[in-house]
Image (cartoon, rainbow, N blue to C red):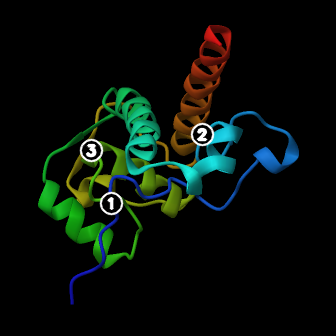
Amino acid sequence: MRKLQKKRSSTPCLGICSTTFGDEVCKGCKRFSHEIVSWTKYSLEEREIINDRLEQFKVKILKRRFKIIDRDLFISKLEEKAINFNHALDPLTWIFDLLRAAGSQKFDIESFGIKCLVQFNPKTIKDEINQELLELSQVHHERYFKKL
């Protein structure tokens, strides 16, 4: 049975929205509060623009830390572990999904077909990446609103 694959315009929502607490940038998905509120009204193209931005940020952060050695193995392991990921996005972004799903559990990242280019500490790396992604999104948000 083939698993249903997400489309490029699928929501990046992680179900842990911080905009309900007043954040302008969600600490979960890193979208702007107005993007979350208007998501269902956006066209597919508008959704893709937002997903493209988030994808670019993730790739920028993750490519310094990881290299995918075996894409097919990576897909197979994600599916075997029932880890939700968006097939339409750059495979590097799937590492973010893997780390989020793993939490602080120890696991062998190389068994997923991934080479770590930095010291890999599963207890801290997810938070480091998440913080850097949030900072990129916040800077982008500030620049976006300065232009308006």
Image quarter of the N terminus: bottom left
* Front in this rendered view, residue 13 or 59: 13
Q: Residues within 10 Å of mark 1 (few under 14, many from 20)?
A: few
Name the residue that disc number 1 marks: 7
Image quarter of the C terminus: top right
* Rendered view: 40 above or below 63: below
**Residue 2 coordinates in the image, percent (x, y):** 21, 83
Circle 3 sits in a helix, a strand or a loop, which is it? loop
Circle 1 sits in a helix, a strand or a loop, which is it? loop
Q: Tell me if label 3 and label 1 are in contact, CB under 8 Å.
A: no
Identify the amino acid type marked 2: Lys
Q: How far apart are marks 3 and 1 (CA)?
A: 12 Å
Q: Which of marks 2 and 1 is in front?
A: 1
Q: Tell me if label 3 and label 2 are in contact, CB under 8 Å.
A: no
Residue 113: quarter of image? bottom left
Q: Earlier in the sequence, mark 2 or mark 1?
A: 1
